[in-house]
């Protein structure tokens, strides 16, 4: 059972509005920062991703951040065990900031270079998707801050990991990701390719 499963149960116990999307990748709750919809009290516009570090974003007031004990207080969920569990997962998430090729360390994300964001170039339709999905007009600083990848291939080449593209299967997957998806380093561990491990921290959405 995940942190958000526990949060969902806690919210229902307090008779709060909360529901998962069909894929259970996001939990929607009423935003405590703007009060959410006044016309329909069953509508919820604060989205919490069901993955560490549990990013949240309100589509109404654009409040955003990472789920924490303070967020639970704002949601009127006073649960010490849940707060401690969230803190532990976030602490573990922050500790590992490495990029690996199998078991071999390649690069720390703290020093990783990200391709320039050419907002009017081939990244334009991907940015339009992000803006439409979030309901905001993202800036270069937003994209940089959230480590959005405009091109996985460019990222690998820029960080001197182009040898990974020598693997035909991985190279094809990389091409498909660049053409049909947009994502970013939302977790802090990147493991490439899937020869000795299947874990990956690249999270994205198909357009």
Image (spheres, helix red, strand yellow):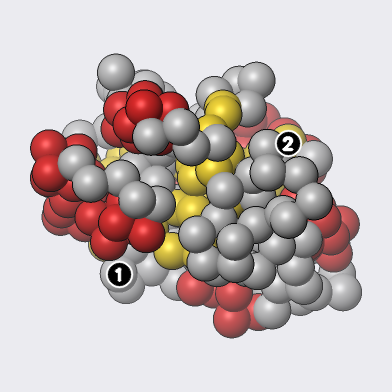
| Of 153 and 54, the residue lying toward us | 54
* Residue 34 locus on image (x, y percent): 60, 67
| Of 205 and 72, the residue lying toward us | 72
The answer to whether mark 2 and mark 1 are in CB contact below 8 A is no
Which residue lies at the image location 29% right of the left edge and 56% below the top edge?
73
Q: Identify the image quadrant of residue 173.
A: top right
Which residue is label 2 attached to?
Answer: 206
* Residue 29 locus on image (x, y percent): 54, 43
* Residue 116 locus on image (x, y percent): 64, 76
Neighbourhood count class around disc 2 (C-alpha, 10 Å): few under 14, some 14–19, many 20 upward = few
Neighbourhood count class around disc 1 (C-alpha, 10 Å): few under 14, some 14–19, many 20 upward = few
Q: Separation of disc 2 and disc 1 at Cα?
A: 26 Å
55 left or right of 198? right
Quarter of the image for the C terminus: give it.
top right
173 left or right of 135? left
| Of 184 and 179, the residue lying toward us | 184
In this orientation, does residue 190 appear? no
Secondary structure found at label 1: loop
| Of 28 and 97, the residue lying toward us | 28
Height in image: 167 above or below 163? above
């Amino acid at each position: 059972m995940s942190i958000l499963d526990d949060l969902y149960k806690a919210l229902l116990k307090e008779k709060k509005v909360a529901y998962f999307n069909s894929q259970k990748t996001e939990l929607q709750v009423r935003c405590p920062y703007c009060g959410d919809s006044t016309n329909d009290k069953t509508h919820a516009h604060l989205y919490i991703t069901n993955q560490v570090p549990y990013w949240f974003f309100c589509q109404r007031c654009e409040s955003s951040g990472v789920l924490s004990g303070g967020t639970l207080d704002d949601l009127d969920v006073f649960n010490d065990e849940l707060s401690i569990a969230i803190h532990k997962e976030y602490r573990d998430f922050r500790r590992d900031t490495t990029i690996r090729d199998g078991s071999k360390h390649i690069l720390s994300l703290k020093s990783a270079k990200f391709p320039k964001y050419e907002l009017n170039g081939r990244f334009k339709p991907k940015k339009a998707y992000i803006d439409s999905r979030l309901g905001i007009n993202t800036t270069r600083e937003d994209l940089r801050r959230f480590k959005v990848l405009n091109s996985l291939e460019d990222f690998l080449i820029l960080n001197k990991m182009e040898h990974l593209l020598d693997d035909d299967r991985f190279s094809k997957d990389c091409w498909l990701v660049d053409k049909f998806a947009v994502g970013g380093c939302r977790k802090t561990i990147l493991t490439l390719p899937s020869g000795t491990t299947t874990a990956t921290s690249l999270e994205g959405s198909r357009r």
